[in-house]
Each structure stands twice: as structure tokens, then as C-alpha cells.
Image: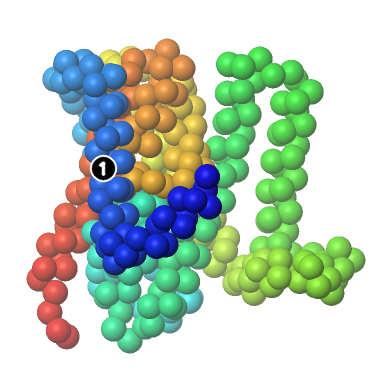
Amino acid sequence: MVEAVKNIVNKNSFIQRYKTVIILIAKVVIAFGLLFYLINSVNLNDIISAIKNADIAFLTIAFVLSIVNVWLQFYKWKLTSNIILQEERSSKIWLSLFYGFSAGVFTPARTGEYFGRALAFKDKSLLNVTLATLLDKLFLLIIVAFIGSLSSILFLHYYYNITYLITISLFLTVFILFYVLILMIFNAEFWNNFLFRKISNSKRLSWLFKKINHFHSLDKKYAAKMIFISFLLYCCFIIQFALLAAAFSNQNNFVDYIWAGNLVMFAKTIIPPVSFGELGIREGASVYFIKQVGGTASTGFNASIFLFLINLLLPSLVGLILLLKRNND
């Protein structure tokens, strides 16, 4: 069946000619389709009512934290630009970050951000900026994977009644993998052990060694700073989500909302991006997990949408204005 579909696609000249446009339209349809489904399943009246009755103080704090959020992203990108791109100009780094917001906000997994960040650096190659951006995102991904995995294990334990033996085994597995990763980044002697010598000499596994060998060459101070800043950035995201959920529910169940926020971040990361700006996926995960911890669907939907607005859409609009005013210097 799959091969038959591939043959039809390959033989159809119209599909081949307009393949990029078709994929673009499909992603738009998926994004708005998911949002339409969620809005209808959540109940539009509940959403509007939740917004009208939201706690203004919590909304204000969440909005102020978006400024902290953007600054942490700037500082993280500045560290990477200084080390990897040898770029010291803060003005260019700010421009690069905001151009990235604009180019990435409506692309799956924010892939447009790689191109957007390169626009501010005329003297840097697109490949170098792309690699630097990948590295910049890697440390946050490590934090999300670690905390999200632990949160997911607890969720499975309490809501799906998996046994203590399985829970403890999964916890140990996550901690061991994280410990190995930390050793790969910070311990030079780790690369000289028997296991890694075997991997590097193996024909089948040498490709794997080449991939992970990049950790060996990372500047240790840079890596430590990036892990710390990425952790702060992650905490900022989660606190914002919890504040927004509390604002729209008018309930101060911060522990539950922080737990739900961890699960939403993890789910958003591991689910393959099939829509623009991950719209629909993030909201669906938010609705599901907020309901699991005792909240309402409208609370989860509104918290997720507002998080998208203040952390991604508003900075992307600033980036768009800067991009339109871009000069030729």
C-alpha cells in the first residue's frame, strides 16, 4: 500500500512540481484543523468566560516573565555566538534572536529559526549559524528530556498504576543516561575508557562515536553556563504556564500546574512536529494534562494559547518590525 502511494506521487508531475506548496498547505490545514477541533471540543463559551474572569495579577506576572524569558534566550544565544561564531556585538545577537523568532514561529519545530538567525550575520555562513543554533537548542533539549522523563514516569505511576519496581527501574535508567551524558560533556577521561575505544574502532559503531565525539570538544565553562541558563529558561516556561493556568482557573494549584507544565513541554518535544508553530499539538497536550490534574479543558487551552502569544508571537512581531526596518549596513 505504501509503495503504491509512493509510485503515484512519483509519477504525478503536478505533485512533483508543486510538492513544496502542497506540503505548506497541508501543514496550515493541520494546524488550523487541530485548533478548530480543540476549540469545538473545549467549548468556546468556556474559553471566553475563563478569559473574562482571569486573575489579572497572575496574568501580569506571566507577561513580565516573558521579558525574562526572552532575555535568558538572548544570553544563551550570546554565549553560543561568542564561542562558536566569534560574534561579540550584542546588537547583532539581539537582531539575530528576533529574526529567528519571526522566521520560526509558524514553522514545524521552529525550523525557520535557523535561517532567520543567520540574516543578522552577513559575515557568517548559513551552515555555521545553523550548527550554532542547533548547539544553542541542545542544552534546553537535555533539560526538557531529563525533567520531562521523570515527570512522565511519575504520571504513569500515579495515573496508570504501574508497579514500584517498574517506576524505580525507569527512574534509574533516566538518571544513568543523564549521568553518562554529563560525563561525556565534562569528563575528558571518560572518552579514554575501554568502551569508547571499542566503539571508535568498530566499523559498525564508528559513526556513532563521530556524532557524540562533539561533546568531547565542548568548552567546559561554556557547557556549564549553558546548562544552568537552559535550566533557568525551562523553569521560566514552567512557572509561566502554572501562573496562566492558575489565572484562568482561579485556583492556586501551582504544584499540579507545574507538573502538568513539565508533561506538556515533554509531550510537545517528543511528538513529531506536523503543524505550524506546533499549534494544536501543544494545546491538545495542555488540555489533556490539565484535565488529568483536576483542571478544566478551557484552562489548559487558554494557558497554552497565552503562553504561545506572550513567548513566541509577540517577540516574532517585534522581529518582523526589525526585519522590515532592516538596512544595508
Closest to the observer, 315 or 91: 315
Secondary element at tag 1: helix
Where is residue 221? Give x, y as percent: 58, 67
Q: Is residue 59 visible?
A: yes
The crowd level at tag 1 (other Cα within 10 Å; few <14, some 14-19, many 20+) is some
Using residue 201 as the reference point, say whether residue 316 is left or right of it.
left
Look at 31% across and 48% down and name the residue there. Answer: 27
Q: Which of the pair 11/80 is nearer the observer?
A: 11
- Between 58 and 147, which is closer to the camera in this rendering? 147
Q: Which residue is mark 1?
A: 29
Q: Is residue 61 visible?
A: no
Residue in view at x 28 percent, y 62 percent = 14
Residue plotted at (53% across, 56% down): 139
Horizontal side, residue 308 vs residue 135: left or right: left
Residue 5 place in picture, x, y as percent: 45, 50
Which image quadrant is residue 16 in? bottom left
Colouring convention used in this rendered image of the protein? rainbow
> Where is the C terminus found, in terms of image quarters?
bottom left
Instruction: Measuring from the top left, give residue 324's x and y in whole percent.
Output: 11, 68
Report the label total.
1
For the residue marked with disc 1, what is the amino acid? Answer: Val
Rendered position, 107 above or below 146: below
Q: Where does residue 244 sit, x and y in percent of width and height?
A: 30, 29
Q: Residue furthest right?
A: 194
Which quadrant would residue 122 be assigned to in this image? bottom left
What residue is shown at x 65% (from left), y 68% (from top)? 211
